Amino acid sequence: MISLRYHVISIAAVFLALAVGVVLGSSTLSRSLLSGLSNDNDELVRQVHDLETQRNGQNARLADADSFATQVGPMAVRGQLTQRTVVLVTTADADPADRDALKQLLTDAGGRVTGEVQLTDDFGNPEKADQLKDIVTRLLPAGVQLPTASDPGTLAGGLLGPLLLISKTDNKPQASAAETAAAFAGLTDGGFVKASQGIQPAQLAVVLTGGAAKGDGAGDRAATIARFATQVDRSGAGAVLAGSDGSADGTGSVGVVRADTAATSILSTVDNVSSPAGRVVTVLALREQLEGGSGRYGSAGNAQGPAPGAPAE
């Protein structure tokens, strides 16, 4: 007769066998899984190594290209701006190194920088827009007419353009020295600009800005600079808006201009001024402005080509 104890021992043996089977099966599965993971890891390591090699090679080629552009830049622009004058306008986020290098290249091209104006953070601040517009309308020189647009960038360009650029029709200043001094004093006291001493109006203007706009109101700030530069261009023989990497996207002032066909028909833009090649292109774009042309240059997807006269990519 089979006892209860026999049943208990039999059931226990079955469960023990199942447990041993699970352990043995999982051990085999674990070894297989670990082997597969190890192979995948080795492949990923090889891919990372290949990508690092490619990146290092690209960085080396870019460094060589920058070095080459730095060396040949003065020769490439020589004589392009002989006896021409240029005023330099910088935004608060413009890189001082870009400014200094561009000034040197303008001199290498035979041009003369007549002064510098820095637009402060408040210039593009939407919360300061009404104050900026009020100063512009109060300090407008006699004989200068503001554009019909009501945005602060266009209105500020309508004031500063005639102060910064000589007339393209007779090459004469568009405001008296006293009117110019009063306007700059008012804008400086309002916290909107910082102007160099003894600034004089020029034939051409470069508006030098940074990359993609960031933070609250970034779009409004970019639009203000874009419209300002466009209106400055209308005030004289020509202007170029030059920005660094990222300036041509939707949050950068270069990108805002390029999205406006009316603006791109007159104002030239460069999206890679932080590179030696981009600074050379900025000078060449100024020359093109003198000849009545305009273009979108640089390395961004919405550029028409790398430089004036170069085939479109």
Image: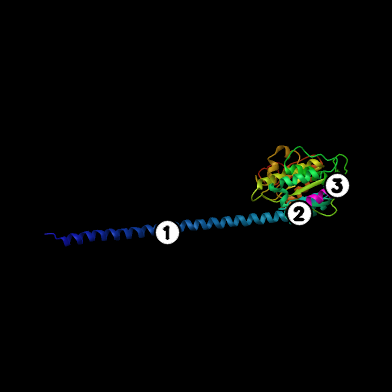
Report the quarter where the C terminus lies. top right
Foreground residue among 73 and 98: 98
> Is 301 in front, or is 237?
237
Q: Earlier in the sequence, mark 2 or mark 1?
A: 1
3D distance between C-alphas at marks 2 and 3: 27 Å
Type of amino acid at the residue the image marks with label 1? Leu
Q: Which residue is mark 2?
A: 99
Answer with mark 2 or mark 3, whichever residue precedes in sequence: 2
- Measuring from the top left, give residue 35's x and y in whole percent: 42, 58
Image position of 297 (left or right of 1): right
Left or right? Give the position of 14 relative to 311. Answer: left
Circles 2 and 3, Cβ within 8 Å, touching? The answer is: no
Q: Residue furthest left?
A: 1
Q: Which comes before the other along the chain, label 3 or label 1?
A: 1
Q: Nearer the viewer, residue 48 or 141?
A: 141
Mark 2 or 1: in front is: 2
User: Dot 1: few (<14), some (14–19), or many (≥20) neighbours within 10 Å?
Assistant: few
Q: Is residue 34 magenta?
A: no
The answer to whether residue 48 shows anywhere in this view is: yes
> Which quadrant is the N terminus positioned in?
bottom left
Q: Amino acid at mark 2?
A: Arg
Q: Which residues are magenta?
A: 180-190
Residue placed under numbered mark 3 in the picture: 179
Q: Position of residue 210 (x, y in %)?
A: 70, 51
Q: Which residue occupies the foreground of this view, 186 or 260?
A: 186
Q: Which residue is mark 1?
A: 34
Element class at badge 1: helix
The residue lying at 29 percent from left, 60 percent from top is 19
Q: Residue at x 71, y 37 (%)?
A: 261
Give, as a three-letter code, the residue at label 3. Glu
Mark 3 or 1, closer to the camera? 3
